Image (spheres, grey):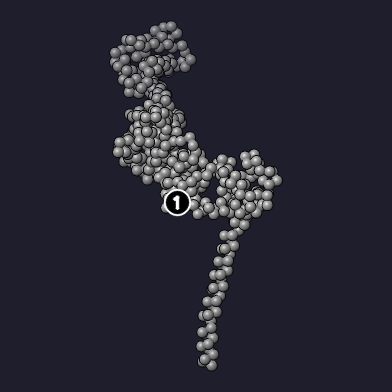
């Protein structure tokens, strides 16, 4: 009996990943509860000891030894219930302790089922993970029994249950996949400096090498794209752009907008805005489907990015120059200074305000005030132009409709006159 008890404790400890000492303590406490139930003394002094080496059980009530095995069926049932509750509690603590350490890492599991859109994943024989709909990659469905990899997003205890929240949409999921597929990242030879993602569609990753001999982009792509291919397949075909990190904002923005080719970049540090000029044939590529490429590039670099064609850029500069020169004290030198500051349109000048003009460009405060006033007036005029053209267009349509109506009436009148 004693040896059998030891075997049972060892099996529970191994299967449930619970410390043997915790199980022995639970057994002792369950037997104390059974003895108190038997004697009807909830507060009575009962002591139970289990020898950890032999499995021998000894019990005492107020110093007198008792045989715990002869207490009867009802106390035995009480001991069983207490034991089940305590082992479940220990198992919850064990699961929580194990998975809280693994938070932020990738775990592999098998799909069990869907529950109201939430994907239930078996992580091992002891724990299940929950992947809410918002953490699933849009357009992907998984079959029961399918093996998938997920990020452990959070671990929390809810209503006496350990809830392991999983994700496949979080940017860190991509980060961990790169660590698994690219040894240089795991070994800190290559560093991921920035990562932005629109799950299921596109991800941009900016990488830098701490070793001059290692090409960060080439290492991440792998021979004939082998490394990046594995990650893309895991994500169901999501596009991944790997760009080279650069401390220069201009170079980083140009890299971030790839595969589009950039002609020119003007940075306005006062507004945190980058005006990027691309040729007409590169415009759709730079903006991307539904603005995705430029949106991700902006998040990757930390700059608001405006994409313009050379024609739009030149038009903006011409309007700015005309506006500035309308102020008597201003000349081409002021225009050049503003462009150097990253101000390339009337709207930029209005947004910047007087302070940068005075501090950064050493422009006289009175002149700075006049320039901003002129910019505000010009911006109003430009904003009113489309409305004016629209109103003129509506008027022309109404006039055209009236003329047509009159033309239709004239033959009818002639016909009437002829018959009379």
Which of the 4 quarters of the picture holds residue 144? top left
Q: Residues within 10 Å of mark 1 (few under 14, many from 20)?
A: some
Q: Is residue 100 above or below residue 134?
A: above
Could you tell me residue 218's position as x and y percent?
35, 35
Residue positioned 38% across, 36% down in the render: 217
Could you tell me residue 8's position as x and y percent?
31, 18
Residue positioned 44% across, 36% down in the render: 245
Residue indicated by mark 1: 279
Let me know if residue 408 appears in the view.
yes
Residue farthest right in this picture = 366
Quick one: quadrant of the C terminus?
bottom right
Task: Identify the secondary structure beneath mark 1.
Answer: loop
Q: Nearer the viewer, residue 321 or 400?
A: 321
Which of the 4 quarters of the picture holds residue 378? bottom right
Q: Nearer the viewer, residue 30 or 64?
A: 30
Could you tell me residue 220's position as x and y percent?
36, 35
Q: Nearer the viewer, residue 230 or 262?
A: 262
Q: Nearer the viewer, residue 279 or 47?
A: 279
Could you tell me residue 335's position as x and y percent?
60, 48
Residue positioned 54% across, 86% down in the render: 413
């Amino acid at each position: 009996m004693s040896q059998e008890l030891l075997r049972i404790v060892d099996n529970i400890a191994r299967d449930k990943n619970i410390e043997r000492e915790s199980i022995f303590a639970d057994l002792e406490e369950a037997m104390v509860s059974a003895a108190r139930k038997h004697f009807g003394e909830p507060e009575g002094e009962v002591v139970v000891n289990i020898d950890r080496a032999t499995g021998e059980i000894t019990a005492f009530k107020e110093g007198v030894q008792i045989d715990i095995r002869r207490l009867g069926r009802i106390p035995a049932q009480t001991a069983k219930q207490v034991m089940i509750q305590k082992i479940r509690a220990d198992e919850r603590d064990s699961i929580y302790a194990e998975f809280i350490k693994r938070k932020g890492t990738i775990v592999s599991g098998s799909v069990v089922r869907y529950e109201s859109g939430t994907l239930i994943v078996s992580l091992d024989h002891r724990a299940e993970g929950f992947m809410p709909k918002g953490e699933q990659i849009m357009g992907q469905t998984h079959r029961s029994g399918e093996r998938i990899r997920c990020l452990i997003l959070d671990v929390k205890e809810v209503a006496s249950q350990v809830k392991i929240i999983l994700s496949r949409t979080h940017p860190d999921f991509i980060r961990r996949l790169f660590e698994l597929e690219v040894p240089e990242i795991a070994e800190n030879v290559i560093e991921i400096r920035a990562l932005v993602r629109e799950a299921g569609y596109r991800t941009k990753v900016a990488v830098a090498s701490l070793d001059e001999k290692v090409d960060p982009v080439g290492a991440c792509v792998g021979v004939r794209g082998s490394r990046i291919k594995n990650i893309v397949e895991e994500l169901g075909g999501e596009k991944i752009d790997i760009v080279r990190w650069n401390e220069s904002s201009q170079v980083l923005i140009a890299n971030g907008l790839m595969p589009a080719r950039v002609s020119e970049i003007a940075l306005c540090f006062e507004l945190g805005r980058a005006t990027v000029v691309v040729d007409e044939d590169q415009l759709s590529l730079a903006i991307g489907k539904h603005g995705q490429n430029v949106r991700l590039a902006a998040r990757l670099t930390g700059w608001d990015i405006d994409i313009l064609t050379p024609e739009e850029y030149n038009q903006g500069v011409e309007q700015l120059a005309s506006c500035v020169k309308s102020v008597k004290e201003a000349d081409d030198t002021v225009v050049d200074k503003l462009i150097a500051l990253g101000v390339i349109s009337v709207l930029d000048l209005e947004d910047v305000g007087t302070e940068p003009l005075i501090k950064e460009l050493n422009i006289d405060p009175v002149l700075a005030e006049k320039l901003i006033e002129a910019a505000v007036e010009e911006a109003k005029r430009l904003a009113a132009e489309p409305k004016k053209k629209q109103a003129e267009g509506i008027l022309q349509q109404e006039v055209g409709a009236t003329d047509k109506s009159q033309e239709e009436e004239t033959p009818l009148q002639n016909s009437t006159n002829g018959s009379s």
